[in-house]
Image (cartoon, grey):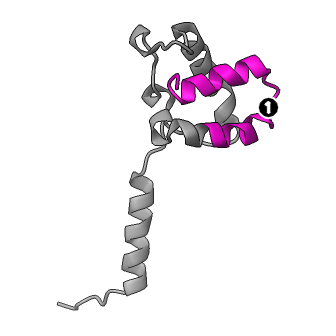
Amino acid sequence: MKSVKRNPLLVVGLGLALTIASCSKPTVDSLYVPTAADATATATLADLQAGRNLYISNCERCHNFYLPEKYSAAEWKNHLPGMTSKTSLTSAEILQLTKYATKGK
């Protein structure tokens, strides 16, 4: 039987391609869904739910969804102003979106 030589670059490239293909981006179904237990003194359940709807309808236009738990409240509060400035969201909507992403913190 004739042996086949393996090209190291081909093997690495195939491995990388399989790794990338197996990574899945978050979907709407995987996003945090607020419940009454998540309401805080500064974020009502209605705020959190409205923020989730705003997140779903606005953020994926420019990039994939990011799970709110992926970043700390401080990180969200640092990054959201730069992103929301590219939208037509009102300041009240931006506050609701921020409350959702930070889980009311």
Is disc 1 placed on a helix, strand or loop?
loop
- Position in image of residue 44 (x %, y %): 54, 9
For disc 1, the neighbor class at 10 Å (few under 14, some 14 to 19, many from 20) is few
Q: Is residue 50 left or right of residue 91?
A: left
Nearer to us in this view, 58 or 15:
58
> Please, which residue is most extreme toward the left here?
1
| Residue occupying the point 22% across, 91% down | 2
Give the residue type that dot 1 points to: Thr
Decide: is 61 above or below 15: above
Quadrant assignment, res 37: top left
Answer whether residue 80 is magenta in the image. Answer: yes
Quadrant assignment, res 90: top right
Decide: is 91 above or below 7: above
- Position in image of residue 99 (x %, y %): 58, 23
- Position in image of residue 53 (x %, y %): 61, 18
Quadrant assignment, res 59: top right
Q: Is residue 20 left or right of residue 43?
A: left
Quadrant assignment for the N terminus: bottom left
Nearer to us in this view, 11 or 93:
93
From which residue to which does the magenta span run?
77-105
Dominant SS in magenta = helix
The reply to whether residue 37 is visible in this rendering is yes
Q: Which residue is mark 1?
A: 87
| Residue occupying the point 43% across, 16% down | 38
Q: Is residue 49 left or right of residue 83?
A: left
Nearer to us in this view, 29 or 55:
55
